[in-house]
Image (cartoon, coloured by chain):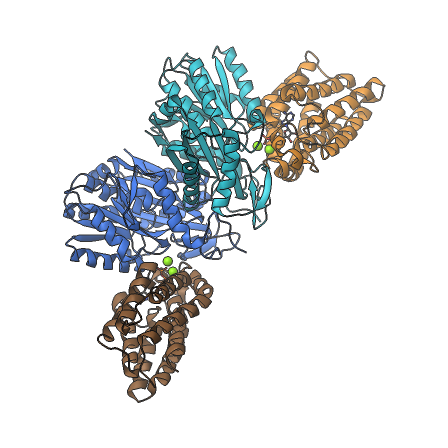
Chain colours: A orange, B brown, C blue, D cyan
Amino acid sequence: MTDITAARLVVMFGKIAAAIEAEKDRLCALDGVIGDADHGIAMSLGFSAARDALAALDPAADPTTVFNTAAKSFLNAVGASSGPLYATALMRAGASAKGKAALTDADFVAAFQAMAKGIQDRGKAERGEKTMIDAWLPAADAAGECISAGGGLAASLEAAVSAAKAGAEATKGMVAAKGRAERLGERSLGHMDPGAASAVVVIEAIRDAVAN
Amino acid sequence: MTDITAARLVVMFGKIAAAIEAEKDRLCALDGVIGDADHGIAMSLGFSAARDALAALDPAADPTTVFNTAAKSFLNAVGASSGPLYATALMRAGASAKGKAALTDADFVAAFQAMAKGIQDRGKAERGEKTMIDAWLPAADAAGECISAGGGLAASLEAAVSAAKAGAEATKGMVAAKGRAERLGERSLGHMDPGAASAVVVIEAIRDAVAN
Amino acid sequence: MQTKKIINDGNKAVDEMLEGVLAAHPNHLFAVPGSPRSIVARNGPRPGKVGIVIGGGSGHEPTFLGYVGKGLADGCAVGNVFASPPPDPILECAKAVNGGAGVIFQYGNYAGDVMNFDMAAEMAAMDDIEVRTVLTTDDVATSVKAKRRGVAGNFFVFKASGAAADKMFSLDEVERIARKANDQTFTMGVALSPCSLPQTRKPNFEIGDDEMEIGMGIHGEPGVQRGKLRTADEIVDDMLDRIFAEMVPSRGDRVAVLVNSLGSTPLMELYIMNRRVQQRLADSGVGVHATWVGPYCTSLEMAGASVTLHRLDGELQEMLDRPCDCAMFRAG
Amino acid sequence: MQTKKIINDGNKAVDEMLEGVLAAHPNHLFAVPGSPRSIVARNGPRPGKVGIVIGGGSGHEPTFLGYVGKGLADGCAVGNVFASPPPDPILECAKAVNGGAGVIFQYGNYAGDVMNFDMAAEMAAMDDIEVRTVLTTDDVATSVKAKRRGVAGNFFVFKASGAAADKMFSLDEVERIARKANDQTFTMGVALSPCSLPQTRKPNFEIGDDEMEIGMGIHGEPGVQRGKLRTADEIVDDMLDRIFAEMVPSRGDRVAVLVNSLGSTPLMELYIMNRRVQQRLADSGVGVHATWVGPYCTSLEMAGASVTLHRLDGELQEMLDRPCDCAMFRAG
Ligand SMILES: Nc1ncnc2c1ncn2[C@@H]1O[C@H](COP(=O)(O)OP(=O)(O)O)[C@@H](O)[C@H]1O
Ligand SMILES: Nc1ncnc2c1ncn2[C@@H]1O[C@H](COP(=O)(O)OP(=O)(O)O)[C@@H](O)[C@H]1O
Ligand SMILES: [Mg+2]
Ligand SMILES: [Mg+2]
Ligand SMILES: [Mg+2]
Ligand SMILES: [Mg+2]
């Protein structure tokens, strides 16, 4: 497998934007049940802003610049909860790629893990609090374990997708302890967290764009 | 036939109130089409106020007092268009009954005609302008002709009911030129005027209460 | 199914509302003793001042109640929902605000209001109170001015005459200014959804999911035309075309603007409309002296909005700028 | 089927609204050059004065925009509908209102707002602007105060700190007063119908024809309980029971009252609610210093209402009574 270039990352952000756009209504509907019904809008605004900003990027840019440009445009387009969470995720990915002209498989998984860590640092959520963390952390762990075990990038991201899906599914059984749904208490039970659901969409798009 | 006493008139107002109450929703619905959907409410407020005020009346009251009490309570309970129109009608009936301890058949028809005249004087509507006048004037004329021709009270009021019904029906073919529906122009065509519809209900109740 | 309302008893809604109003605004308003539907300004009426009595049906709040106060109306007669008040509370208002200089009755041009206020005026005359009547007729949805309804634009007409009376102008002068203000006020509205009366709790008209009623009044009376719902800019353009046709603005004219919600249309939409109003006025060379945006004359919870232009000369501008202090409105 | 709105393009609704706001209120408001989502008071910020920056998602108008003006907030960062603004416009507000005496960020306690305002505060610190944060947490629907949301009661909290800053109090003092005001502010709301976002134009939650949501926030987030719609008096009694449980009023306490519409609930219903609020307060021996009734903090066109009590001591009363002059709100 060849290294992942900045150009490939730009393509990846295009795929994420398209995937989120396709799921926008479902994400709003999920947020309507336990939140304020705008999560699909926020994610779509954020990733299409990232895609548009990247389209204007100098073709000679490095991976860090791609991630940082995406982070900044996401943040300014969104606000909301998802803005700082994903912007921090992307800035951390940029930091982890610092100084690299292209990313090896291991570099990419490290960047992917940095994203999850960034979300956790920004939002201070723990596992089990019914947030996107419940998809992102298991996904990052699964990818990390797989690549360490010599599983390769494709297998690692496939493992990430499975873990994210399981994590998102598991949020149905959780009582929210962070974000807007927190005040719902027991009434949040039985519903999937929208941020966890969108994490699955994002991670799937990453896999589709990168692991082939 | 015996003369119509004040007590009989009090009963008559009770019957009108009951009849209007039963038709309240239909009258609101008619007013909803070409007006502001409250005609049933106004008529019901007015006649139940009249009924309640009459319930408190000195049993020795004369017909004029009955009509005037009804007029005053109707007016103060309603406002709207129907308030001054029916209040004036009832005051004119009171004036026409002035000095009489009880009403003969002819007196009653005269009072009935005075009501129609009162509505016209107050509202300045002509026939064909799609108002309650289009029921009241034909009814008053029909009753007047019948009693003059020796038809008796029952027949006269029966004639009034028929004429009112025909008049109300005819308002469907009229373009409104008075009241709220006036601004509708051609769009008022095809719909019965709510005030004409309620006039039929009132006149039927009068017939039921008096003509037996 | 009944429409949803936070009320106790539909038949008591107006009286309970008034209790709530008086409790909220004791420094601004009181009811004439023995006449709870006659609401008077605490600091409005005074000897030698022309009294301004406004009124009409309830359900348009803050119209009419909210415009009673020093510098605006002195008293307000309160009818049932969408129904003129009867003559009695109007007469009690006239008596309460009479400062010996005469009283002006001002209200929207509706058959029911005209009959009831006219009866009250006759009764006031018997009490030696000179009453003049100035009907508001700002709704340009009707082509014949004399047949027009009074809608949101009565805000400007009341403001002008309230200011004139507050300046202790004579009855003739206050009447003249009120008429001029009315002549220079032009409103056009659209409705998107019905409201429902507290007594019936049924929608008071039907309208398709993608339709709007152009020229709707403030009681759910049908307007001049049903149309498909369009964009804010298209709606405003249509409104202004109709208003301009009546007003015939010249470059250099100055206006005050009111973008009014009929009830449930939120400020966001009103301000989006205002954006277009101001663009169009700028394009026509018409200057804007002041703008109000919000629920100023409503139809309970109806969705929809109106735009009013009030053309100013020096005198009307002075009236508009004069401070007033009402329970639900302040200026200056 | 899409919900009905008078807009042009859902994605442009906030920016077009802001254009309309600035056009309507040029004497009160301007946007920071190059930062159209940062709105600043014309006569607010000045050297030596603590700057007050408020903000949050759009769709709550007149909150937050409407409370920017002399004597109240100095600036406001405007987010998308129901979404916190990003750090940039917040930072631009902080810079624009900074008079060298520090800046207070005040906004409702929501995860998204906290993260974005905190990022902006870090950035402001790099520009040597001292920022303090006071979250509003007036919604008693949640039992743990620190986890509470800020809802309509932020009106009183902003008013108190705005007045303190206007009196040129120090950053410490303004912060202390803001915290005290927040501690003494208690809100409870109910919602009867959903609103819809301009971008989706779909109802943002579902509710039965005879149901209400008790403890609903101002974004359509579910509340604490679904219940059958009850009478105004029953609803208010339930609200006040919950508020009193937190506030623990004593006879002789004095409060300010806010009866707020979430959007389409009309003044008539709010005043009917206020009637009961005032009865209950009188029964509890609690005096009322002032009452506001109307749409002060909305959720677009949602139907529903909230009641807020703001307990006053001498200092808070002085802050409340201090005049302020904003585009959509005036007092004193
Ligand atoms: N502190 C947090 N940490 C991690 N994720 C969070 C946190 N708070 C909220 N979220 C996520 O954000 C999602 C909601 O995002 P969004 O709807 O875009 O923002 P908002 O709640 O501001 O409307 C939630 O479903 C949850 O997954
Ligand atoms: N000038 C008038 N003369 C006679 N009848 C009139 C006049 N104006 C209105 N009406 C009648 O009043 C009816 C409406 O009454 P109502 O709904 O009670 O009052 P409002 O129009 O004030 O709501 C109309 O249907 C019409 O029959
Ligand atoms: Mg959300
Ligand atoms: Mg009617
Ligand atoms: Mg009516
Ligand atoms: Mg949101």
- Residue A76 vertical placement versus D21 (above, below): above
Q: How many circles with numbers are drawn on the protein? A: 0
Residue at the spot 32% in from the left edge and 71% down from the top edge: B133
Residue at the spot 52% in from the left edge and 30% down from the top edge: D246
Residue C55 image offset from top left, x and y in percent: 30, 50
Residue C134 image offset from top left, x and y in percent: 23, 52
Residue D291 image offset from top left, x and y in percent: 38, 35
- Nearest the eye: A132 or C278: A132
- Residue D181 vertical placement versus C306 (above, below): above
Residue B185 image offset from top left, x and y in percent: 37, 63
- Nearest the eye: C322 or C74: C74
As drawn, the residue found furthest toward the bottom would be: B150
Q: In which quarter of the image is the C terminus of chain B?
A: bottom left
In terms of image quarters, where does ligand 3 lie? top right
- Residue A209 occupies which quadrant of the picture? top right
- Nearest the eye: A174 or D65: A174
Q: Would you say residue C288 is visible in this rendering?
A: no
